[in-house]
Structures are given as structure tokens and as C-alpha cells.
Amino acid sequence: MGDESATRDARLRDGEAEAEAFRTGRTLAEYGQELTRIREQQRSAFTNIDSLADAIGSLGERILTQRLDTVTDRLDTVTDRLGTVTEQLGTVTGQLGTVRDCLDTFTDRLDTVERVLFALARAQGIDPETTG
């Protein structure tokens, strides 16, 4: 009986150790994922910094007006892209208006059908307001 109790205690300790190892492994995996996200954000930030540095150039490499021209060109490109997005949003808005008009027409037709059905019911002596 003492051996059974000792074996059961050892199994419990092993189970607790396994559970703790599992929790620790899961925590380490979560930390690893977080570190990966941080590295990706850093890589993106450094890429943006490198792009800006390329646009501006190092001192003495180009005169200030050339650097400003490069920045202005890039801003113009961004402005053009924003203009395209604005046009696309206008198109979507117009399409939504068309859909809204179609829904209004459909609703009007449903109202007409309902009036015709009510008139037919009344012509047959049926009160459509009380008929379920």
C-alpha cells in the first residue's frame, strides 16, 4: 500500500511538472510571436527610414533644392494616388446611389402589388386588414 501511494504521488508530481512545462512552453511561444511582431515592425520602420534617407540623400551628395525636388516628386505621387482613391470612392458612392434608387423603385412596386392584392381581396368580400 505504501508503494501504491508513493507511485500515485510520483505520478501526480509528474503530471504537475508536465502541466507546468506545457504552460511555460505556451508562454515562451507567445513571447516568440510577440518578438516576431516587434521585429517586423522594426524592419518596416527601418525600411521607411531608409526610403526617407534615400529621398533626402546624404549631405554634400546633392544640393538642397535637388533633395527637396525629390521629396516634392514623392509627395506628388502620393497626392496622385490619393486622387485616384478619391475618384474610386466617388464611383462607389455613385453605385450606392444607383442601388438605393433600385431599392426605392422595388419598394414602390411592392406597394403597388400590395394595393392590388388588397383591392382584389376586398372585391371578393375579404377584409385584408383582419385576415391573418
Image (spheres, rainbow, N blue to C red):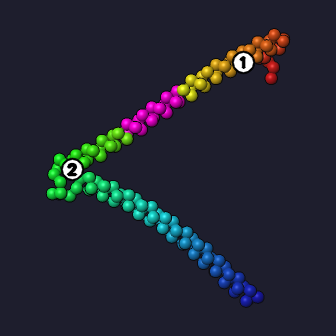
Q: Residue at coordinates 45% horizontally, 35% vertically from top-left? A: 89
Task: From the viewer's side, name the closer residue of 78 and 11.
Answer: 78
Q: Residue at coordinates 68% horizontally, 81% vertically from top-left? A: 11
Task: From the viewer's side, name the closer residue of 128 and 112.
Answer: 112
Q: Give me the disc on residue 114.
A: 1
Q: Is residue 111 magenta?
A: no
Q: Residue at coordinates 42% horizontally, 34% vertically from top-left? A: 87
Q: Main secondary structure of the magenta part?
A: helix
Q: Residues within 10 Å of mark 1 (few under 14, many from 20)?
A: few
Q: Which residues are magenta?
A: 82-97
Picture quarter with the C terminus:
top right
Q: Nearer the viewer, mark 1 or mark 2?
A: 2
Q: Residues within 10 Å of mark 2 (few under 14, many from 20)?
A: some
Alpha carbon distance from label 1 to label 2: 70 Å
| Mark 1 vs 2, N-terminal side | 2
Is 56 placed left or right of 99 in the picture?
left
| The image quarter in which residue 119 lies | top right
Q: Residue at coordinates 45% horizontally, 64% vertically from top-left? A: 36
| The image quarter in which residue 81 lies | top left
Is 44 placed left or right of 102 in the picture?
left
Is 125 placed left or right of 81 in the picture?
right
How far across and how far down the image is residue 50, in percent?
30, 58
| The image quarter in which residue 100 lies | top right
Is 73 placed left or right of 114 in the picture?
left
Q: Which residue is mark 2?
A: 67
The amino acid type found where label 1 is placed reads Glu
How far across and how far down the image is residue 84, in percent?
40, 37
Q: Is residue 21 visible?
A: yes
How far across and how far down the image is residue 80, in percent?
35, 39
Q: On screen, 44 above or below 29?
A: above
Q: Count the numbered circles shown.
A: 2
